[in-house]
Amino acid sequence: MNKKEVLEIRKQYTHEKCSITRICGCYVDGEKNIKTQIKEAFLSLPEEETFKYFNIFKQTLSGTLGKNLLNLEFPLDAENPGGAQEFLLKLRDSKLQDDVLLAEFYQKVIENYYFPENYYIILIHVAYDIPGKSTDGSEMFDASEDVYEYLLCSLCPVKLSKPGLFYNTETNNIENRIRDWIVDPPAKGFLFPAFNDRNSDIHSMLYFSKQAEELQPEFIENMFGCTLIPLTAESQKETFNYLIEDTLGEDCDYEVVKNIHEHLTEMVEETKDSPDPLVLTKPDVKRLFELSGVPEEKMETFDQTFEAAAGEKASLLATNIASVRKFNIETPDVVIKVNPERTDLIETRIIDGKECLVITVNDHIEVNGVNVRTIAPQRDEDYEEEFEEAIPASAPAAPDAPIDFGATQA
């Protein structure tokens, strides 16, 4: 799914566009016991509750694609009879009316989802009547031909509200507030099947993780049978940095790394308006390195290095590996933060036999918030010393009294 397709589904979570047929859920305590369950026609809920559920559903489809939202494909064995994908299809086609399937689904989540505290499993069935699109991209609701029938699941932590005082209007007193169990925004969730090319794709799903670095791969594999799980955003960044360092080796100099940063930033900027995120495969990264000036002899072992670090068919999301908003240079004692668009202000030079970074100052500089000059102005005594040094040693001494050039000799 791309950004436009995710946004199209999120926009449906309003009373005016709501196509949610049913909502089910169960509250699980820290010992993995089901404490209570719900099963309702969604629009039969009080309006105040539906608004809060709408927010939860929108949050389950929020974040960055490739970071918080991952497109997952089912392997063939997951689509075989008895596989995870077949089970989800049965659950969807039941429209959440089959209590046995629901109980099995809850048990699968409880067994595989790691969360040591209380949480709330929310599952909805939706039948979205997909509107047609005109040539200019506007929706034509009378031209709808397909229905996107799907499940959305949200796993929400349930925590005690903070202790405190409150004003009791009945007693007109400030009193101790009773602590309630509050349903927090979702930590994990999924959409099945995926909404690819604006229609159902039963071979794919969308997985949500609020914390991009805590995907819980064991949960994904055991719950959905998906074994090909993308690297986390941080892992992709670390892998990309390793590729640079390992490929260049001792020749990993400032200029080449700066060039890689600049070319990568340009690629991200050029594709920022595209609904599909920019993905770099092994050949793409290889071309990027070559374009940035990595010597040909250093690229001879690139394929093996990439496969060892990321895997033969791995891909890296450009927004995960590019530092578009920052360009930092760090030494053990100094950190320099540069506007990514002005890396030209930094040069490398050898001064007095030492490797140095030279920074061009175009306007002014600040030291701890104080505007200062780059070089202090010359003092009078400095000027006098320079003047004295400039007078030759053979020059006549200055007279004690001023000479009157207007006087005549007697």
Image (spheres, rainbow, N blue to C red):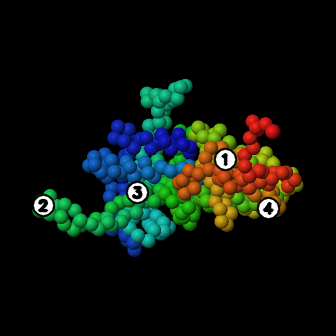
Tell me where residue 168 appears, x and y as whole percent.
Answer: 16, 61
Q: CA distance from mark 2 to mark 4?
A: 75 Å
What residue would you read off at disc 1? 361
> Neighbour class for label 1 at 10 Å: few (<14), some, many (≥20)?
few
Residue in the foreground of this view, choosing between 197 and 209: 209
What residue would you read off at disc 4? 354
What residue would you read off at disc 3? 185
Along the polypeptide, which appears first: circle 3 or circle 2?
Answer: 2
Along the polypeptide, which appears first: circle 4 or circle 1?
Answer: 4
Q: CA distance from mark 3 to mark 4?
A: 54 Å
Residue furthest to the front: 410
Which residue is drawn at the image coordinates 54% and 43% (left, top)? 3
Front of the two marks 3 and 1: 1
> Neighbour class for label 3 at 10 Å: few (<14), some, many (≥20)?
some
What residue would you read off at disc 2? 172
Along the polypeptide, which appears first: circle 2 or circle 4?
Answer: 2
Q: Quadrant of residue 215?
A: bottom right
126 sits to left or right of 318 = left
Along the polypeptide, which appears first: circle 3 or circle 4?
Answer: 3
Tell me where residue 282 appears, x and y as whole percent.
Answer: 74, 52
> Neighbour class for label 2 at 10 Å: few (<14), some, many (≥20)?
few
Q: CA distance from mark 4 to mark 1?
A: 21 Å
Residue furthest to the top: 135
Which residue is drawn at the image coordinates 72% and 49% (left, top)? 401
